[in-house]
């Protein structure tokens, strides 16, 4: 093993700063195991419990991060399925977390008057999440311990029924589809959340109608010129810093803040 090969085994574990990074690492591990383990020709039974734990934990992290994301922007922040945020963050109940995620998404969707298309797309993938939750039956013990214990250490029940069978190809297919939900939901609402961020940090700005033409873009002088050229090509240029969409007669202007480009509907 040469020096470069040996260095791959050194991990700067302390540089994983947040749960979004951990979510990504768990997801990569699930993908890696599903792709590579079959090459051993061994049955998935031998690693099924830890594999399903990893997969369930990805979903748990994704749900919590999505709820936290939308909580920043909704006006009504009251939890429905949990007594407080500590209970939510400590929970492993995918059903309750999923319900809370849906409530927060719909709450924000209604608040900003987002499109029916966005709601329909959310519902399409949320149905997959509901189906997967039924298959996984995930709680605090599932895929971690064989039994659920009471406060006195006595067995309450087995964490998994003895006759339970899971088709991992079906589960992995559904898991992959859920990436469209967990990444897609905040991205779909990005034209609204990015505007809220801009307005919050620029309270004197009073021309916006509550959303952007697209999500904010990274700023460089060269890229800003490319953005303006693209707007001129796709829309009708009205003035030096204003473009109109002929399809809906909406006007847009470009603002730059904190190294980002905002194309704001005005």
Image (cartoon, rainbow, N blue to C red):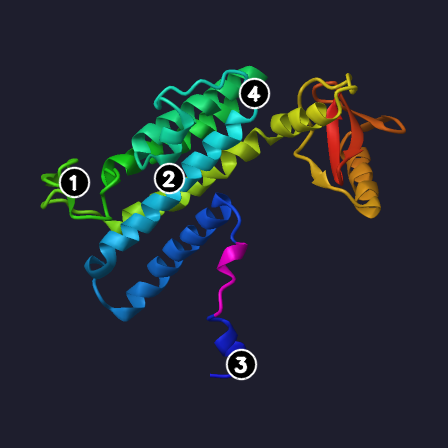
Residues in magenta, as a range: 10-15
Sequence-wise, which precedes: disc 4 or disc 2?
2
Sequence-wise, which precedes: disc 2 or disc 1?
2
Is 34 in front, or is 94?
Answer: 94
- Measured as percent of width and height from the top left, residue 237 is found at 84, 28
- Residue 136 appearing in the image: yes
Q: CA distance from mark 1 to mark 3?
A: 46 Å
Residue at far front of view: 152
Of circles 2 and 1, the one toward us is 1
Q: Is residue 67 left or right of residue 93?
A: right
- Measured as percent of width and height from the top left, residue 15 is found at 54, 55
**Quarter in which the C terminus is drawn:** top right
Q: Is residue 12 magenta?
A: yes
**What residue would you read off at disc 2?**
60
Sequence-wise, which precedes: disc 1 or disc 3?
3
Q: CA distance from mark 4 to mark 3?
A: 54 Å
How crowded pointer 2 is (Cα within 10 Å; few <14, some 14-19, many 20+) is rated as many
**What residue would you read off at disc 3?**
3
Q: In terms of secondary structure, where does tag 1 sit?
A: strand
- Measured as percent of width and height from the top left, residue 27 is found at 42, 51
**What residue would you read off at disc 4?**
114
Of circles 4 and 3, the one toward us is 3
- Measured as percent of width and height from the top left, residue 188 is found at 55, 31
Of circles 3 and 2, the one toward us is 3
Residue at horizontal 65 percent and vertical 30 percent from the top: 194
Residue 93: quarter of image: top left
Sequence-wise, which precedes: disc 4 or disc 3?
3
**What residue would you read off at disc 1?**
148
């Amino acid at each position: 093993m040469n020096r470069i090969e040996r260095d791959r085994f050194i991990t700067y574990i302390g540089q994983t700063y947040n749960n979004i990074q951990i979510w990504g690492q768990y997801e990569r591990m699930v993908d890696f195991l599903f792709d590579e383990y079959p090459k051993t020709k061994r049955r998935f039974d031998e690693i099924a419990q830890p594999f399903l734990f990893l997969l369930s934990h990805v979903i748990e992290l994704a749900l919590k991060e999505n709820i936290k994301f939308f909580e920043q922007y909704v006006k009504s922040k009251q939890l429905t399925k949990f007594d407080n945020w500590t209970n939510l963050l400590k929970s492993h109940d995918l059903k309750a977390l999923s319900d809370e995620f849906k409530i927060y998404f719909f709450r924000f969707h209604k608040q900003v008057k987002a499109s029916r298309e966005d709601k329909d797309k959310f519902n399409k993938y949320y149905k997959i999440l509901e189906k997967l939750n039924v298959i996984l039956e995930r709680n605090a013990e599932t895929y971690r311990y064989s039994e659920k214990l009471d406060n006195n250490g006595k067995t309450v029940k087995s964490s998994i029924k003895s006759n339970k069978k899971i088709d991992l190809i079906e589960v992995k297919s559904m898991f992959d589809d859920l990436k469209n939900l967990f990444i897609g939901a905040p991205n779909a609402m990005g034209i609204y959340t990015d505007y809220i961020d801009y307005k919050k940090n620029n309270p004197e700005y009073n021309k916006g109608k509550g959303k952007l033409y697209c999500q904010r873009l990274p700023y460089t002088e060269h890229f800003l010129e490319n953005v303006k050229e693209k707007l001129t090509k796709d829309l009708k240029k009205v003035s030096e810093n204003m473009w109109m969409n002929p399809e809906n007669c909406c006007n847009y202007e470009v603002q730059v803040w904190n190294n980002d480009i905002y194309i704001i509907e005005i």
